[in-house]
Image (cartoon, rainbow, N blue to C red):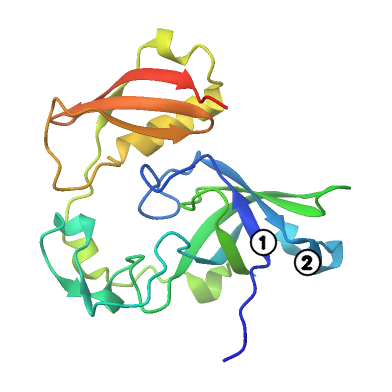
Amino acid sequence: MPEIKAIARICSPFKTKFGIPRQSGIAEAVRAEIVFEPEYRSSDAVRGLEEYSHIWLIWQFSEAVRDTWSPTVRPPRLGGNVHVGVFATRSPFRPNSIGLSSVELERVELTNDRGPVLHIKGADLMDGTPIFDIKPYITYADSHPEATGGFTAKTEFHMLKVEIADTLCGNMNEDAKTALIQVLSNDPRPQYHDDPERVYGFVFAGFEVKFKVNGDTLTVTNIKKEEA
């Protein structure tokens, strides 16, 4: 088999797996950058890409690489207790740890030190994730309004009400706050967790965020700048 090389890496607000949206686009306010590896920093390679509003990213679940695989997985959407065939899901635990995401392309920036940089929205990738390829999203070929959604169309999309005191957000800009609320409203907890006293935490956009969930309400208990 030919070697697959990483052509770029993403710079995203997510430093760990916890908190990352389970699908691309559901937290559309989340901004990120795609920075090409030195070998691929050519403005010619992205010529014309700015004419597209969305792109496909083909990437590696770099934190889920393993030597073994299972034919079934337990999707969070089904509560983490129902086994489904791995090829009927988008689980990261696959024979080949390859991910596929559709993201909004805000702009293409040509820089002197990093080459072309792609500014995107709605990514579901951890910071530093290797990207194998980038392709334009083509509406006539990639959009299928009549498509069926399997078990994902039969389960309710669970959203939480997010409560954040203004005093906690003093050092966070409005764009980051909006993105954080979208991430939290999609309930980043494992689906089988339901302890109202448990405190969860993750790092987002350089801030350590702590929160609790009681019923359908998520309350942020603390936000502080990440220690260097």
Can residue 95 be seen at all in this image of the molecule? yes
Give me the residue at 85% from left, 47% from top.
Answer: 113
Please say if 151 is above or below 216.
Answer: below
SS for tag 2? Answer: helix
Q: CA distance from mark 2 to mark 1?
A: 8 Å
Q: Earlier in the sequence, mark 2 or mark 1?
A: 1
Can residue 47 be seen at all in this image of the molecule? no
Q: Quadrant of the C terminus?
A: top right
Q: Quadrant of the N terminus?
A: bottom right
Give me the residue at 43% from left, 44% from top.
Answer: 16
In the displayed structure image, the side of residue 113 where residue 60 appears, left or right: left
Q: Which residue is mark 1?
A: 8
Could you say where residue 84 lies in the image, as x and y percent from the top left? 18, 72
Q: Which residue is mark 2?
A: 40
In the displayed structure image, the side of residue 80 where residue 108 appears, left or right: right
Give me the residue at 51% from left, 61% from top.
Answer: 102
Could you say where residue 43 lies in the image, as x and y percent from the top left? 85, 61
Q: Are marks 2 and 1 in contact (CB under 8 Å)?
A: yes
Q: Amino acid at mark 1?
A: Ala
Could you say where residue 122 lies in the image, as x and y percent from the top left? 50, 48
In the displayed structure image, the side of residue 117 where residue 196 appears, left or right: left
What is the crowding at mark 1: few (fewer than 14 residues within 10 Å), some, or many (at least 20)? many
In the displayed structure image, the side of residue 23 where residue 159 appears, left or right: left
Could you say where residue 147 lies in the image, as x and y percent from the top left? 33, 72
Quadrant position of residue 132: bottom right
Please say if 174 is above or below 94.
Answer: above
